[in-house]
Amino acid sequence: MRIAIFALASPRKALSPIFSEVVRLLREWGAEVDILHPAEQLLDVATVGVEYDLYILKSKTELTLSIAGILHAAGAAILNPYPVSATLRNKITTFQMLQAAGVPSPQTWVALRADDLAPLLREGPLVVKPYRGSGGEGVRVVWDAEELDNFSGEEEPMFAQRYHKPDGLDLKMYCIEGQVFGVQRVWPARTYEEKLGEPFTVPPELRDIALRCGEVFGIDLYGLDIIESLGRPYVVDVSSFPGFKGVPDAALRLADYVFWAAEHAAGEQPSPRRKVGT
């Protein structure tokens, strides 16, 4: 059974501790695992073909998504599937789908010109972020119309949401095959310890919101960011295959799911699932 992982790290940089352990466990259980770094080589697109039973789309750069699209068209099994990964890379489509499904999220707008957002500031500040961004990069809270001048000349769509002042820390929700884990952390998180955050017991309302997000996109492995403002929750981001930092036994849970998915993709008789404490 062969598994390929499109990694975020370059060959000169180690994988995250969690994902390094995932790879170790998969190999220990008998899987052949290769780490792919498409950006490190010249690639003849005509030669791209399905060579593995399962591809893990951990990295979602424009290059890896493009390669995943080729593999998807050729019938490859990909985790998470290419269409969903591409959708979640685009915040415009992501939030339209969330809001159509009734998932609580901030009011959202898209504009090509910064001036078009100015009238919205009469009702309060906006959060402006790259519509294909990730990891909190490029996120800005805009309070005054003059601040929009910093965005003039940009050719990409401007993605804006109504700003809601958080009641406390940001809430990271991680979902693995129907199990929901909560980690509260400061934003922006600057150190590895801050990224680990502090686990918390997920209340029923937030658990329901997290599972509804998975139902919208049809996936089992994902993460979402929630802020609570005046006691009301808002989903402000959804990500495919996040880092799962702060989740108890994260590596074992992920490796167990990936191994099962690879066996299923390879047409093998599934092994007994590893029991992990809930």
Image: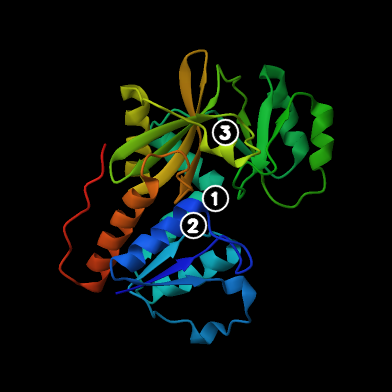
SS type, badge 3: strand
Q: Kindly indicate the quadrant of the structure image that contains residue 260.
A: bottom left
Which residue is rendered at x = 46% and y = 59% of the image?
A: 20
Q: Position of residue 143 (x, y in %)?
A: 75, 24
Q: Which residue is mark 1?
A: 90
The C terminus - image quarter: top left
Given the image, on which type of amino acid does mark 1 rest?
A: Asn
Nearer to us: label 2 or label 3: 2
Can residue 219 be spotted in the picture? no
Question: Which residue is nearer to you in this view: 45 or 202?
Answer: 202
Q: Which residue is mark 3?
A: 108
User: Is residue 103 rendered to the left or right of residue 143?
Assistant: left
Q: Is residue 191 above or below residue 118?
A: below
* Residue 243 x, y percent position in the rendering: 48, 48
Q: Amino acid at mark 3?
A: Thr
Q: Residues within 10 Å of mark 1 (few under 14, many from 20)?
A: some
In this orientation, which residue lies closer to the viewer: 127 or 183?
183
Mark-to-mark CA distance, 1 and 3: 13 Å
